[in-house]
């Protein structure tokens, strides 16, 4: 059948230009004529979708083509809410959603609490699933509201979403449940037990087992930590002005100083902070330690690491020491090259590279390398549309997944440039949805992020009627009229869900929905498609690794679905994706000139990548120091009256740093913003980089497009989400029995693996 514009709209596709439609019609006719070769027809469909994906994402946002291929195209369906959920139809709809969500959660809390009291065997057996439903009921609204409050350009939407977010978070913190029934735990499947253990640890960290006085102290400390975290990241106006003044170094002073002294003055001004900020940091560290003590832990690191792969602070220290030993020789060698540059340009007698020298001589070093290598620009081969089309091809080869961009409904997205990309499998089944909010706009925060709006979860076994029967003790539910029952159900109706059958699994599962946030420059008629820098290409692949994990981690339980796994394991799939970018076979798929379609010569890319990563050992050294500082700041030592964050930093640098540090009076630790979001877990990124390097070398390096390698990683790691012990999963994948226990030896082994150059192949 030939396709025209109206047919495409009816299929939920965006309008295409006449020339594009004609080409698609020709391809479809070829597919129809080749009915004896179904693979050929499938291939033509894949090619059509990839071409359409490229056209949509490369279309200028200020042209008529954008409206014919983007989210603002005309629609055949009535307006929906955000994410096609009626409960998100307007800001005014959110208070009702919050009320219904809390009402349903209350029923679940009551039902769980009374399960053991009633000694109902069937209810006890379903407690873990009820806990998971409770978590899902709350998190689906909380997670969506977190996204909306951060990215929606409309102030009313952002404010309403923030109110809903805070109300539900407050309610969630008030839920007090403990799964302590030993016989129940013994009857659970491994996945269900993982869910139960995750809940148990979350509850313990929340202090729900504490007596009333201790519980009040816990709540007060938690509130103080929220306030201090915000203050540390966003200084008051007076402190911000003080920082600005500290960074102002008169030009006449700089120009009159020797180059080295000028660099030091500028460095200390830029990395300096007020004494008040140091006091905020130290108060935050003390209150974290007090919080840990209240909940029965010796230190905040011990409290935090119990449910991570590392398990305890000692194991983190052992991993970092092993990694540092592996990396130190390479760091010394690179610093020696920088020192040689310094001696040539400034002072032949200079004996070291200081912190304020690093960036300057690194730039000099990279400039000298770039002059020796190809100057061919690579950005024209990495348009946003080209990359998404290439990603679709790559994922199809590895996991049998591909992308299909579809038309959005009125009200489905928060900005007209946001695209709905559906993830399909080889059986043409919908696997999940990615909303791609890729381009910068006024008021949008910078950086990249992956938001999970909805996790996978089995839904066909939900017992919504039972919530009323068991969750309302003493209520004569059987005596109520049908209308009364319907009204009660309506009053506690949770957020809408989309559920589908999943190949190879029994039952129906929630459709995963994620949002990919980037801040790329917008494509325009004058400038053409958005061409990405190498760093932006890596960022896109990294975030897509999280999205793939969300799509393939289809567990029965929300609590362990997709990226809901240990903090020091969650970055593995995303970092692994970065390894694919710069190998020859993948380059031929993803790196094509945006206008001519010609492939990027691998020799050109290889020189560029080698230059950009030539100083990676020094970067790793700096990351190790920060991870060690993070651990030092979360010991019980912070409760000592003699504790000083300045002195702790100085002592660490004296023992470990290969660069001459800035004086402690600069207070550079006050710029370590990750101390708020990654308290005692900053090592995680290094840890997963080491694991990803090993997985790449052992599983993918020989043939990065080998479907068997992709399926092995999927079956042994991705599909489990957080429902399998990650150490056991890695031991199984890598055939490394020594790491299966996840003990001290395992952490040291991972450290000794080191961090290999990402994806670069040696010349043959």
Image (cartoon, rainbow, N blue to C red):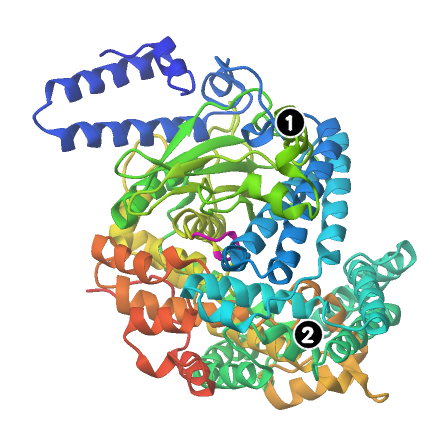
Label 2 CA crowd tier, 10 Å (few <14, some 14–19, many 20+) = some
The residue that label 1 is drawn on is 481
Residue drawn 81% across the image and 69% down it:
215
Q: Disc 1 and disc 2: Cα gap in Å? A: 84 Å
Numbered badge on residue 218: none
Magenta residues span 556-560
Q: How many marks?
A: 2
Name of the residue lying farthest toward the right: 238
The percent position of residue 260, horizontal first and vertical second, equals 68, 74
Question: Nearer the N terminus, badge 1 or badge 2?
Answer: 2
Residue that badge 2 annotates: 260
Q: Is residue 470 above or below residue 45?
A: below
Residue located at (14% from left, 29% from top): 38
Corner quadrant of residue 735: bottom left
Percent x, y of residue 180: 59, 70
- Main SS of the magenta part reads helix
Mark 1, secondary structure of its residue: loop
Q: Mark 1 and 2 residues: CB-CB less than 8 Å, in contact?
A: no
Q: Quadrant of residue 671?
A: bottom right
Out of 506 and 22, give the one closest to the viewer: 506
Residue 470 placement, left or right of 733: right
- At 32% from the left edge and 29% from the top edge, which residue is drawn? 49
């Amino acid at each position: 059948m030939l396709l025209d514009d109206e047919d495409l709209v009816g299929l939920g596709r965006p309008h295409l230009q006449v020339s594009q439609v004609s080409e698609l019609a020709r391809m479809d006719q070829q597919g129809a004529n080749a009915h004896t070769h179904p693979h050929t027809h499938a291939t033509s469909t894949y090619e059509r979708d990839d071409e359409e994906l490229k056209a949509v994402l490369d279309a200028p946002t200020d042209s008529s083509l954008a409206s014919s291929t983007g989210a603002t195209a005309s629609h055949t369906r009535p307006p929906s809410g955000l994410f096609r959920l009626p409960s998100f139809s307007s800001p005014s709809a959110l208070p009702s959603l919050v009320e219904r969500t809390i009402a349903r959660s209350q029923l679940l809390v009551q039902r769980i609490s009374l399960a053991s009291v009633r000694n109902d065997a069937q209810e006890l057996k379903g407690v873990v699933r009820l806990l998971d439903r409770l978590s899902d009921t709350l998190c689906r609204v909380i997670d969506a509201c977190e996204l909306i409050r951060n990215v929606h350009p409309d102030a009313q939407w952002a404010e309403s979403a923030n109110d809903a977010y805070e109300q539900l978070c407050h309610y969630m913190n008030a839920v007090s449940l403990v799964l302590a029934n030993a016989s129940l735990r013994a009857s659970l499947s491994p996945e269900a037990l993982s869910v139960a253990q995750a809940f148990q640890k979350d509850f313990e960290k929340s202090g729900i087992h504490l007596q009333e006085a201790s519980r009040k102290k816990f709540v007060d400390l938690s509130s103080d930590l929220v306030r201090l975290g915000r203050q540390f990241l966003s200084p008051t106006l007076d402190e911000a002005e003080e920082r600005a003044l500290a960074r102002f170094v008169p030009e006449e002073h700089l120009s009159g100083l020797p180059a080295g002294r000028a660099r030091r003055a500028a460095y200390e001004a830029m990395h300096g902070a007020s004494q008040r900020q140091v006091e905020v940091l130290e108060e935050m560290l003390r209150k974290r330690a007090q919080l840990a003590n209240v909940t029965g832990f010796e230190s905040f690191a011990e409290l935090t690491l119990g449910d991570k792969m590392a398990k305890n602070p000692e194991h983190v220290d052992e991993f970092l020491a092993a990694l540092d030993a592996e990396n130190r020789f390479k760091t010394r060698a690179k610093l020696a090259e920088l020192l040689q540059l310094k001696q040539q340009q400034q002072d032949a007698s200079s004996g070291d590279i200081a912190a304020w020298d690093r960036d300057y001589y690194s730039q000099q070093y990279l400039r000298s390398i770039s002059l020796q290598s190809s100057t061919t620009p690579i950005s024209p081969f990495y348009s946003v549309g080209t990359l998404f089309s290439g990603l679709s091809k790559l994922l199809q080869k590895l996991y049998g997944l591909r992308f299909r961009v579809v038309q959005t409904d009125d009200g489905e997205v928060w900005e007209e440039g946001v695209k709905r990309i559906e993830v399909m499998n080889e059986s043409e089944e919908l696997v999940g949805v990615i909303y791609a909010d890729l381009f910068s706009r006024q008021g949008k925060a910078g950086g990249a992020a992956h938001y999970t709006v909805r996790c996978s979860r089995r839904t066909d076994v939900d017992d919504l009627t039972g919530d009323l029967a068991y969750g309302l003790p003493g209520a004569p539910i059987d005596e109520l009229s049908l209308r009364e029952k319907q009204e009660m159900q309506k009053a506690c109706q949770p957020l809408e869900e989309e559920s589908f059958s999943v190949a190879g699994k029994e039952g129906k599962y929630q459709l995963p929905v994620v949002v990919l946030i980037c801040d790329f420059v917008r494509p325009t008629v004058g400038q053409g498609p958005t061409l990405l820098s190498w760093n932006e290409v890596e960022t896109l692949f990294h975030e897509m690794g999280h999205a793939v994990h969300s799509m393939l981690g289809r567990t029965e339980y929300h609590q362990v679905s997709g990226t809901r796994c240990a903090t020091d394991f969650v970055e593995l799939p995303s970092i692994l994706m970065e390894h694919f970018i710069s190998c020859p076979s993948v380059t031929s798929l993803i790196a094509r000139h945006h206008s001519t379609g010609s492939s990027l010569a691998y020799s050109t890319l290889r020189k560029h990548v080698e230059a950009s990563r030539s100083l990676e050992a020094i970067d790793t050294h700096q990351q190790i120091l920060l991870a060690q500082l993070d651990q030092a700041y979360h010991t019980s030592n912070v409760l000592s009256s003699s504790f000083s964050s300045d002195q702790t930093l100085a002592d660490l640098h004296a023992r470990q740093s290969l660069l001459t540090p800035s004086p402690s009076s600069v207070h550079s630790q006050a710029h370590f913003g990750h101390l708020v979001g990654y308290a005692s877990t900053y090592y995680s990124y290094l840890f997963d980089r080491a694991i990803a390097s090993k997985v790449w070398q052992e599983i993918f390096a020989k043939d990065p497009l080998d479907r068997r390698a992709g399926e092995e990683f999927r079956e042994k790691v991705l599909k489990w989400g957080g429902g399998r012990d990650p150490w056991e999963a890695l031991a199984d994948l890598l055939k490394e029995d020594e790491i299966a226990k996840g003990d001290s030896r395992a952490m040291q082994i991972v450290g000794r693996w080191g961090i290999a150059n990402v994806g670069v192949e040696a010349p043959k």
